Image: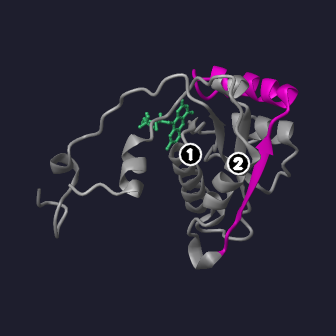
Amino acid sequence: MSENQVLKTIKERRSVHRFKQGPVTDEQLTSILEAGRWAPSFANSQPWSFLVVRDPDTKKKLTEVVERVTIARQGVTEAPLLIAVVVDPLKDPRHYLEAGAVATQNMSLAAQSLGLGSYWVGVYDPSGRRNTAEAKMKKVLGIPREFRLVALLPIGVPVQVPDRDREKLSDIVRYESFGQA
Ligand SMILES: Cc1cc2nc3c(=O)[nH]c(=O)nc-3n(C[C@H](O)[C@H](O)[C@H](O)COP(=O)(O)O)c2cc1C
């Protein structure tokens, strides 16, 4: 299979849950945010905002809430910065979630391409209820009720990059009709 830089970055990206002390520079951060900005969205609605968090107190508060959705909470405190991906359902009532998801993935690939690591903390709660981890994080971050929080992306220099595989193409690809393997 041919392997250009994009394909290599896609394949080499792994979720990284622990981070070294090293910083994420402003230049790196801008490149990552630019990658989010250039994500596709329905009718180019761009329903996202990216909230950058560096404050240790805020990270600590988020870590306490994160405990409810993932065991991998240490990375939220260790990462020098977090990007909260926020979407506005009023800007795109049908596809705000997909838009937030592709922007998140673009940013995680950008981080990978710069030698950084990240992992997706899945905070979005389909119920949209008040007592969820998503609602609590929104409160910590001062995000108004009508917006939704799709993901929290801790970003930093990885301690180590884990090895994770995928199902074989032959097990997941079908041709012409779903019944045909
Ligand atoms: C929508 C979504 C939600 C996720 N939520 C979490 C999470 O809450 N905690 C976590 O540690 N990883 C989370 N992940 C990362 C996955 O666990 C990870 O991508 C998967 O195990 C494959 O590993 P890899 O990313 O290293 O290839 C999430 C990924 C996605 C796409």
**Does the closest atom of ligand 1 sit within 8 Å of the Cβ of label 2?**
no
The answer to whether residue 124 is above or below residue 21 is below
Q: Position of residue 138 (x, y in %)?
A: 80, 42
- Please give left or right for residue 49 compared with residue 17 in the image: right
Colour mapping used in the image: one colour
Q: Residue at x 41, y 56 (%)?
A: 6
Helix, strand or loop for disc 2: helix
In-front residue for pair 162/100: 162
Q: Residues within 10 Å of mark 1 (few under 14, many from 20)?
A: some
Range of magenta residues: 45-74
- Residue 141 as seen in the image, left or right of residue 66: right
Q: Are marks 1 and 2 in contact (CB under 8 Å)?
A: no
Mark 1 / mark 2, whichever is N-terminal: 2
Q: Which residue is the extreme one toward the left?
A: 180
Q: From the image, tell me which residue sits under label 2.
A: 29
Query: Residue under circle 1?
Result: 114
Q: Secondary structure at mark 1?
A: loop
Residue type for callout 1: Leu
- Tag 2: amino acid: Leu
Which residue is painted at 58% across and 70% down in the image? 41
In the displayed structure, would residue 93 be above or below residue 116?
below
Quadrant where the N terminus sits is bottom left
